[in-house]
Image (cartoon, rainbow, N blue to C red):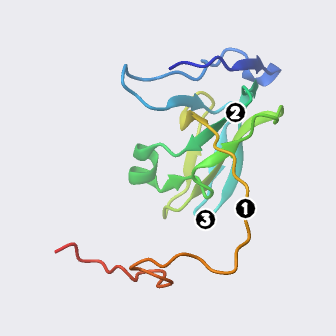
Amino acid sequence: MTISISMKRLPHGEGLPLPSYATEHAAGLDVVSAEDVTLAPGQRHPVETGFAIAIPDGYEVQVRPRSGLALKHGITLPNSPGTIDADYRGELKVLLVNLGNETFEIRRGDRIAQLIPAKVQRAVFAEVEELGDTVRGDRGFGSTGVAAL
């Protein structure tokens, strides 16, 4: 299924490629930086992309890290996946963080993240006195253990 997302290129985005799929079966569209940025270890920065979008009602666009940047350099998104709501009309910025040990240089035109359009399921909460029982119950973090065998 394909949806159409309107995009407005901003002046500092001139000459940059549109978000696009790198391969036929890629799930995410690669998005590039519209600015040069130096990220010191531990530093965060909202990287400009040079465009704004209008997402159709009933959808969001998820922003996800690029696995190669994460593995090789520790560059990721601190709020992964990030969400762009259908009613947002400002510039799309990608919040990156350097979890690596070395300074990382981002150059204008470098691929920095992936965008994945997704349907939104709305919910309402219904307050109740009791919740149904399950085998796990209220045991939380780590309660199912680590070993699979």
Q: Residues within 10 Å of mark 3 (few under 14, many from 20)?
A: some
- Look at label 3 and name its amino acid: Gly
- Look at label 1 and name its amino acid: Phe
- Mark 3 and mark 2 lie on one chain; the one further toward the N terminus is 3
CA gap, disc 2 and disc 1: 19 Å
For mark 2, what is the residue? 58
Q: Nearer the viewer, residue 20 or 70?
A: 20
For mark 1, what is the residue? 125
Nearer mark to the viewer, of 2 and 1:
1
Q: Are marks 2 and 1 in contact (CB under 8 Å)?
A: no
Q: Give percent across and percent down for residue 76.
A: 53, 52
Q: Give percent across and percent down for residue 31.
A: 58, 30
- Look at label 2 and name its amino acid: Gly
Marker disc for residue 42? 3
- Mark 3 and mark 1 lie on one chain; the one further toward the N terminus is 3
Q: Are marks 3 and 2 in contact (CB under 8 Å)?
A: no
Q: Is residue 48 above or below residue 45?
A: above
Q: Give percent across and percent down for residue 141.
A: 47, 80
Q: Is residue 28 above or below residue 139?
A: above
Q: Nearer the viewer, residue 147 or 109?
A: 147
Residue drawn at x 38%, y 22% as measured from the top left? 23
CA gap, disc 3 and disc 1: 37 Å
Q: Residues within 10 Å of mark 1 (few under 14, many from 20)?
A: few
